[in-house]
Image (cartoon, rainbow, N blue to C red):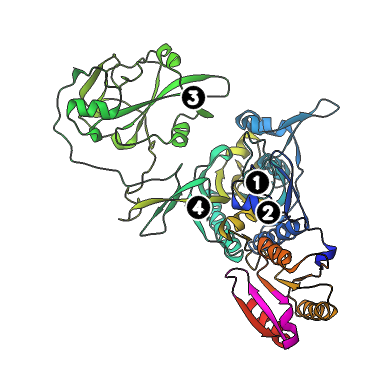
Amino acid sequence: MKFSQMFIPTTKETPNDATLPSHQFLLRGGFINQTGAGIYNFMPLGKIVLDKIRAVVKEEMDNAGANEVLMSFVTPLELWEQSGRSVAMGPELLKFKDRKNAGFVLSPTNEETVVDIVKNRITSYKDLPINLYHINTKFRDEARPRFGLMRGREFLMKDAYSFHDSHEDLVREFNVMEEAYKKVYERLGLEFRVVEADSGAIGGSGSKEFMILANSGEDTIVVCDSCAYGANIEAAKRKPNKKEKLETKALEKVETPNCKTIAEVSEFLNADSFYSMKAVMKKAIYEESSEVVLFFVRGTDELEETKACNAADALDLEDASEEEVIAAGLVPGFCGIVDLPKDIKVYVDIELKEDNNLVCGANEENYHFTGVDLTSMELQYADLVAVQEGDSCPCCDGKLSYTKGIEAGHIFQLGTKYSEAMDAKFLDANGKAQPFVMGCYGIGVSRLVAAVIEQHHDEKGCIWTKQTAPFMVDVIVSNGKKENELEAGMNIYNSLKQAGIETIIDDRKQQRFGFKMGDFELIGFPYAVVVGKKLQDGLVEVVDRKTLEKTEVKVEEVVEYLINKIK
């Protein structure tokens, strides 16, 4: 391809709302352009990169035994009503009606569609397992679309769905998909981590995320310094923090004037805040109602809201206002576990389960209880805490720390959530009707375009990996008006193409050499061959984009030199 024949609208200006390197460089390099909030067009270079990533994903899915299909982007609302997600997905699910007043949605994911495809078409365990996937446009009406392709509303995604006759076979396929995903990211040249994750609106259990490690990542990942353990902060676990148990004392109400925080109460009582309970009041949002719920964690811990939301089986959690807290019969700043209103839902962190000498609010202004014994109470326990740096790994004796990552893939063990809701069944070996056991597996294909750049860039622009580069070599003719330079450049260009190397030649006659080099650095082709003044000495210059190192090579040897470098 010739630069002079290709639409590559590069620019030096960075849009004001582009904060991430990938957003800035993809726009400036002419890979994408924005057409609406969270909606982007892929320009010629961007489309080449997108197709390359798509091809890797497709090849690994095919190698893993999955069947490619193509499901509709527009889905009948009726299917989402059957699964119950027409409400559960909330405003991110874009709904509309056609001229006949029939309801439809723009699919953000396709569990309902694929169940409808398989339902009544696979009727026997003998036809299982099966794994169907497609790579198609999705739409999620994000409240705050931002970061370019990282959090857009319209995006390209590979989603796969497997059907099984048992949970054991689901786990087998889940592991197959995990290995296939690892191969995808390895081939794309990405550093990644597989982490335990929360299943969110998709549902099910046994969820894992594939995180591309990058300082700009939105997700906080908890990792161990001694083993392979990793988890999203929303799902991270730790070995319980323990201290010596205190001697049991009688329950006593103590006046604690103006002491509302754990630190204030602990200082006033000259007590270790480890032996205290922190009350967190939230408003739980359900499908048709909302109510104030109460969570208790140790005084030295913080509530992890996704864990809390799952424990309360709520759609979402919001901060409860002081008026709502008072209306629920609670006392802000002095709320405790003793003598609570009977209709209040209470969830206690599992690490407090055996504690018997705690400090907590007395549900009376300016008073706290000491000697609180949880072993004598019937309570609902759950993992509620946010793992902190320095906590102990749940798998070994290592220490946990935080890093940042970009979610680029997510796999789920769905179980029978969707098949039961949509009455999709098969006959087992005993002739009994059973709901399909399902798994689902997603990769953000368009998001990976941005993820590569988040991990591979410098202050000048993109640095594409060999598997993702739109072209491997950029032959730069220093002065396109000089026939000898243009002829030598075209000879190198044609020879590289004949050798099977994807090459573009910057033959533009109106652009100066400095401008062409700036475009090379911004766009991020792995190598450039500069045909310039040294041509009279029989030399050209090869530039490595990653290191920006320059090497003089004889004209007749440059093709072989690049072949060896690339291989």
The residue identified by callout 4 is 215
Q: CA distance from mark 1 to mark 2?
A: 9 Å
The image position of residue 341, as x and y in percent, is 36, 14
Image quarter hosting the C terminus: bottom right
- Residue 494, relative to residue 341: is it above or below? below
Q: State which tag comes first along the sequence, 4 or 3.
A: 4
The image position of residue 285, as x and y in percent, is 52, 24
Q: State which tag comes first along the sequence, 1 or 2.
A: 2
Q: State which tag comes first along the sequence, 2 or 3.
A: 2
Q: Which mark is residue 148?
A: 1
Verify CB contact (< 8 Å) between mark 2 and mark 4: no
Residue shown at the point (74%, 55%) measured from the top left: 30
Q: Is residue 537 located in the magenta-colored stretch of the structure?
A: yes
The image position of residue 499, as x and y in percent, is 75, 80
In depth, the one of 462 and 550 nearer the eye is 550
Position of 64 with respect to 322 (left or right) is: right
Verify CB contact (< 8 Å) between mark 1 and mark 3: no
Front of the two marks 2 and 3: 2
Q: Secondary structure at mark 1?
A: helix
